């Protein structure tokens, strides 16, 4: 559980650095349609999340993730070996 807390703390920090608040309904907002993010910034967000957590999100799974919550769910599915 402590591992998940540490991971989520990093995730929240990265999302905040992109101006995305994860409270309330914002975590369910579509990155492009509701949060008005350009795909280049979404790629940067994903890169930063992968870098900070030292993981790689599978491309095919990432294509279906369009909200912060869906991205976080994908990150939680990745086994944490550290």
Image (cartoon, grey):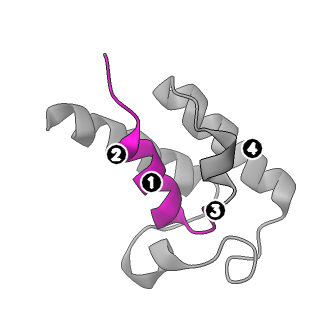
**Distance between the alpha carbons at the discs numbered 3 and 4:** 17 Å
Q: Which mark is residue 8?
A: 2
The circle on residue 82 is none
- Residues 9 and 50: in front is 50
1 or 4: tag closer to the N-terminus: 4
Q: Are marks 4 and 2 in contact (CB under 8 Å)?
A: no
Magenta stretch: give its range: 65-81
Can you tell which mark lies on residue 64?
A: 3
> Circle 4 is placed at which residue position?
44
Q: Residue at x 38, y 43 (%)?
A: 77
Question: Residue at image x 34%, y 30%?
Answer: 79
Q: Quadrant of the N terminus?
A: top left
Name the mark nearer the viewer: 3 or 4: 3
For the residues labelled 3 and 4, say whether their Cβ atoms are less than 8 Å apart.
Answer: no
Left or right, residue 56 beside residue 36: left
Hey, which quadrant is residue 35 in on the image? bottom right
Marks 3 and 1, the one that precedes in the sequence: 3
> What distance separates the C-alpha of mark 4 from that of mark 2?
18 Å
Q: Tell me, yes or no, whether the highlighted magenta stretch contains residue 62.
A: no
Please give the name of the residue rendered at 49% of the width and 77% of the height, measured from the top-left corner. 28
Of circles 2 and 1, the one toward us is: 1
Disc 2 + disc 1, Cβ < 8 Å: yes
- The tag earlier along the polypeptide, 4 or 2, is 2
> x, y percentage for residue 45?
67, 47
Instruction: Give the foreground label among 1 and 4.
Output: 1
Q: Earlier along the polypeptide chain: callout 3 or callout 2?
A: 2
Residue that extends furthest to the front in the rendered view of this protein: 60
SS at circle 1? helix
Check disc 1 and report the residue beneath it. Answer: 72
Q: Position of residue 62 (x, y in %)?
A: 64, 51
């Amino acid at each position: 559980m402590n591992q998940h807390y540490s991971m989520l703390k990093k995730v929240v920090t990265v999302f905040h650095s992109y101006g995305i608040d994860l409270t309330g309904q914002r975590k369910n907002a579509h990155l492009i349609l509701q949060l008005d993010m350009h795909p280049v910034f979404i790629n940067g967000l994903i890169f930063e999340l992968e870098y900070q957590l030292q993981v790689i999100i599978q491309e095919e799974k990432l294509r279906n993730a369009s909200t912060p919550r869906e991205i976080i769910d994908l990150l939680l599915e990745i086994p944490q070996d550290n």
